[in-house]
Amino acid sequence: MKTVMFKKTLFIFFLFVSFIGFSQSIPLSKEAKISVLTCGLGNETYSYFGHTAIRVADPVNNVDIVYNYGAFDFRTPNFVAKFAKGDLQYFIVAHPFPDFLNDYNDDKRSVYEQELLISSALKQTIFDNLNKALFSEERSYTYKFIDKNCTSMVVDVINKSLGQNVITKKEDTDRTYRSILFPYFDGHFYDQLGTSIIFGTKVDQMGTRIFLPFELKNSLEKTTFQNKPLVAKSKTLLEFTKETPKSWWNNIYTYLVILLFVVLARNKTVDKIYFLILSLMGIFFVTMGFYSFHQELAMNYNVLLFSPLLLVLVLFSIFKNKLWTYRFSLINFVLLVVYFLFLINKAHFFITLPLIFTSGIVLVRTAIRNKRPIPIII
């Protein structure tokens, strides 16, 4: 809500809909059009994957509204904790189309429009369902990264209105969610690394559900309804080329330099700090797996690399217990080998490979340091 005009337009629209009532909503004219809007990728974390919304335009009734399922309130009590736990409530909001488009123009993000080629009666049904969601308990939903987001909610409301699962995924169903996500992090190396190691087994499932905006856009182009295309040819409302950010630190080179330093330092203190960081990350992954409702964070096998047992190794090393330091070095090395073998066919194999090699070298080095010599009896 950036302008006074936005607030006035939205208020008048809400008042109009409320006055007419939910049951009949605003009767759309035959000139009304309903379309799916796909918004381009950005370089902010929330915009890496694009965005999806629904536009309802009726020149006869002077209506041009965008319904957006991607809203949330930063003022929500315990916002960060709720977001991490996975019970943060997202909700649908309505924007005047010009304001919606201006926001994306300001952000230099493309916007594409696909008009639904359906009957006036079905357009009315979609419009009624959107308004029902906007003004009822259906307004809010619990966000899920794959299963319930701004894109999947648009798919659900259209399919519900059409009375069948018309919109289904048409491509990349033989690729995992993890491999589908990878290209979206171009220019954001540490975000790519972070999501690679914090996500568990769910994102290694085949990506059979539409969960990203451009997946929906591409699927709509190949979808038919009642023996004809569901959408018209895509229109470009805004066109921008996404600029890949360049950073002196957020790239693979700093990642490799840091790990190379750990390997070449051959310093006990550096090794302990390295293991401490990995173990604390592992403890965080385990905690989030149990605490969070986000299924993407559950069953995180990456704890084999970021093993909490490394903390035990560090403690034994600090207390100069060579025997148990040696034993835990071997235990963690075995876990590392298991992780390596398990990861070979995963999308994030190569991005974690430098970490695997570094951990392997430091674990072997620690084991050698603490291995007791075999006494020779003459």
Image (cartoon, rainbow, N blue to C red):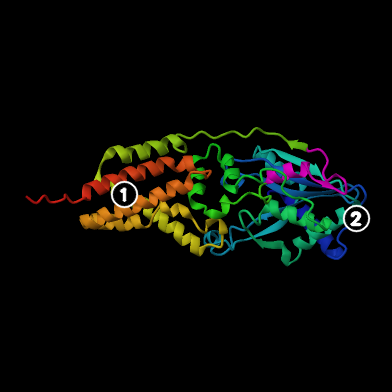
Q: Residue furthest right?
A: 30
Q: What residue sits right under mark 1 in the picture?
A: 273
- The percent position of residue 374, horizontal first and vertical second, equals 16, 50
Question: Residue at horizontal 59%, vertical 33%?
Answer: 243
- Name above or below for residue 13 compared with residue 48: below
Marks 2 and 1 sit apart, C-alpha to C-alpha, by 65 Å
Q: Is residue 24 left or right of residue 277?
A: right
Q: Residues within 10 Å of mark 1 (few under 14, many from 20)?
A: few
Q: Is residue 70 left or right of residue 117?
A: left
Q: What residue sits right under mark 2 in the picture?
A: 121
Judging depth in this view, the residue of 349 and 18 nearest the camera is 349
Q: Quadrant of residue 21?
A: bottom right
On residue 133, which mark appears?
Answer: none
Q: Amino acid at mark 2?
A: Ala
Q: Quadrant of residue 261?
A: top left
- Magenta segment: does it hold 225? yes
Q: Name the N-terminal-most of marks 2 and 1.
A: 2
Q: Amino acid at mark 1?
A: Ile
Question: Residue at horizontal 74%, vertical 40%?
Answer: 112
Q: Is residue 32 left or right of residue 247?
A: right
Numbered range of the magenta stretch:
213-234
Judging depth in this view, the residue of 151 and 166 nearest the camera is 166
- The percent position of residue 289, horizontal first and vertical second, equals 49, 60
- The percent position of residue 149, horizontal first and vertical second, equals 66, 54
Question: Residue at horizontal 71%, vertical 42%?
Answer: 102
Judging depth in this view, the residue of 326 and 285 nearest the camera is 326
Q: Residues within 10 Å of mark 2 (few under 14, many from 20)?
A: few
Residue 190 in sight here: no
Judging depth in this view, the residue of 15 and 116 nearest the camera is 116
Which SS class for mark 2? helix
- Magenta segment: does it hold 239? no
